[in-house]
Image (cartoon, grey):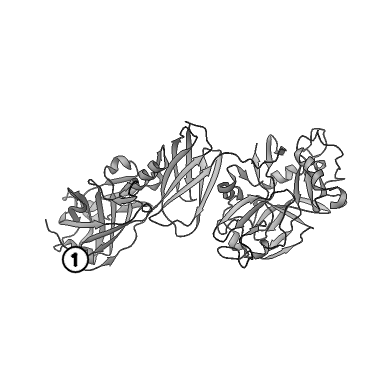
Amino acid sequence: MITNRFLKTLALPVAAALGMFAASCSNDDNILDEQQPSAAKYEIPVTVSATRSGDDASTRAVYDSGTRKLTFEEGDQLFIQGTDATAGTFAGLLSNTAGAPGTFSGTLTTTNAYTGTFGTLFGSASSLTATLLPKDYSTKAAGYLTLSGEGACQTLTVDVTKAFVTAATADAAKKLAIEQLSLERVTAYSSGFALAPVNAVLNYTLSGLTASTSINVTVSDGTTTVSGSVTTNSSGEASFAVGVAPGGTTKSYMMKKGDEQTIEFRANLSANKVYNITRSAAGSSDCLSGVFSVASGKTVKFSKGNLQATYNGSAWSWAFATNQYDCIGNAEGNTKVSNESPFVSGYSGASTTVDLFGWSTSATLYGISSLNNGGDYSGDFLDWGAAASKDLGYGWRTLTKDEWLYLFGMEASNTDKSGHARYRKYFRATVNSVKGIVVLSDDISGISNIPEETSRGTVSTFSGKTYDASAWSALEAAGCVFLPVAGFRYGTDVKNVDSYGLYWSSTTYASYARSLYFYSGSVVPIYSSNRYDGCSVRLVQDQ
C-alpha cells in the first residue's frame, strides 16, 4: 500500500452540518450503458494520519471526563469524498490502523480513470470533505449516520433530527453526544488530515420534574426539530443532549416538555463547543394570589410586577419589579437603550435596568433596542416569558389581544358572578403615588368599598381612588392586580410617563402588534402599536 505525504497545505470548505453528504455519480454510467452492471472502479490505496486537538469544548472522538481530552479510538473510520476534474467523483472509507488510532488506511474509488497518487488528487480536488465515524457508529448513531452505496457512489446521510441522546447524568449525556455527532471539517496537510468538528452540542439538564417519569422533549431552532423521550432521575431531573448546526447568528432554541412547557435558550453557537444549559420546569413562586378569567373556562395568575431586564456589564438577566407599582419611566435604563449589543450604553452604575420593550422578535434582544425601524421587528414572536424562564422559571407568557379584551370586559356577554358586565371589575386609581389601573380578580367577595367604572372605558380620573402602600397591600393580598402608567419608549425617548399605560399582547396586526392602552379617559385593550415602541410587559401563568 502506498503512503504518500504531500507538501501542499489546503484549507478546505466546511461540510454542511445538515442533510446529505453524497459523492455525485453520473447517471450515464448507471443508466445508458446497460452492458455495465456498475460504475467502473478506479482504486487508489491510501494511508493517512489524522490529528485533532481539543478538550472539554470539542465535540468528537472519545471523550474522557477524567482527562477532559479527546482521543481517537480503535475502530473509528474516516469517510472521504470529493470531486476532481480528472478523477471525477471519488469516495472511500478508511479504517483505523491497529495499534495506531490516528492512522487511517483504505481505498479511494474514482468514477474516472486516474493514475496519480491520493496526494496529487487531494491537492487538485475542487471539493474534499471528510466525516469521522465513531466506533460502532451504526449502533451509536443508528438512523443518524447512514452509509450506503458502493465505490465512488457511496453516500453518507446525516440526519441531525435524530441526534438526540439521553442519560441518567449530565456527564454521560455529554459523552454520548460528543461521540455520536461527528460532522468534521477537514484540512489536508503534508502528512494527512487535520479534523475539527463542525457541529455544536446542547447539553441540557431540566429540573423541577416528577421523579422517575418518562417525558417527551423537543428542541427546535425554528428550522430543525429534534425530539426524544427522557426518563427523569430520582431528583426529578432529566439530562439529555442534542447535536445542532451552528448558524453563525444568534438563535433561540425552544425546548418543549410535551405540549405543556416552552423554555428557551438563546445563543450564537460556535462549532466545536458543548453548551451546558440548566433550566427549571417548575412553576414560579412569583405569582400573585388572584385568579383572573381571560377566556371562557381559562384562568391565569399575574406576575408580582412588570417585567424587567438588567445588564450587569457582561450579561442580561430577568426579574419582576419588586412591587406592582414599580416602574422605571424615563430614568436611566430605558433612556440608555442602544441599537447594538449589549443594547445599553453610557450608563453610570455597575448595572442598569430596562422595563419598556419593543415587541419581541428574533431580530432583537426581546425588544431591548433603540432602533425605530419596522423591519427590525418583523420576525416571528418570541415570548418574553420564554426568555425569562432561565431566571424566573417555567410557565410565564404574554396575554393575547383577545385575553386582554376579555379581562377588561369589552364584550356584552362577559359578566362577573353578579351578572355585571366585567368592565365593573377594574377602576383607575393611584397606588403609592403611582397612577394606574386596578384589576379585580374573579373572586372579590373579601373586598369592600370597590369603586365602579361608570361605563365601558370611562371614569373621572386616576385620582378617583388613592391608596398608600399599606392600604394597597391589603388589596393585593385579596387578589388585586395593579398596572402602573409607565409611558412608552420611542428610541431612547420615554414619553407620557404618569399619563399613558401601554402593555404588550402577543398578537400581531399587519405590521403592528396589539397592546392594552389606557389613560385617564379610556381603556383600549386592542390598541395597535408600532412594534418598535417600548411598552410595558406583564406576564401571566396559566392556572
- Please give left or right for residue 535 compared with residue 316 in the image: right
- Please give left or right for residue 235 compared with residue 99 in the image: right
Residue situated in front as seen by the camera: 240 or 42: 240
Q: Which residue carries the number 1 mark?
A: 6
Please provide percent x and percent y for residue 215.
48, 35
Asked whether residue 164 appears in the rendered view, the answer is no
Question: Residue at the top extreme?
Answer: 212
What is the crowding at mark 1: few (fewer than 14 residues within 10 Å), some, or many (at least 20)? some
Above or below 164: residue 199: below
Count all numbered tags in the image, as a single digit.
1
Residue situated in front as seen by the camera: 438 or 288: 288
Q: Element type at marker 1?
A: loop
- Please give left or right for residue 5 compared with residue 268 in the image: left
Please provide percent x and percent y for residue 99.
17, 48
Q: Residue shown at 77%/34% (left/top)?
A: 443
Q: Quadrant of the N terminus?
A: bottom left
Residue situated in front as seen by the camera: 220 or 68: 68
Please provide percent x and percent y for residue 416.
79, 35
Residue situated in front as seen by the camera: 67 or 275: 67
Question: Residue at the left extreme?
Answer: 1
Q: Quadrant of the C terminus?
A: top right
Please provide percent x and percent y for residue 503.
70, 52
Q: Amino acid at mark 1?
A: Phe
Asked whether residue 5 appears in the rendered view, the answer is yes
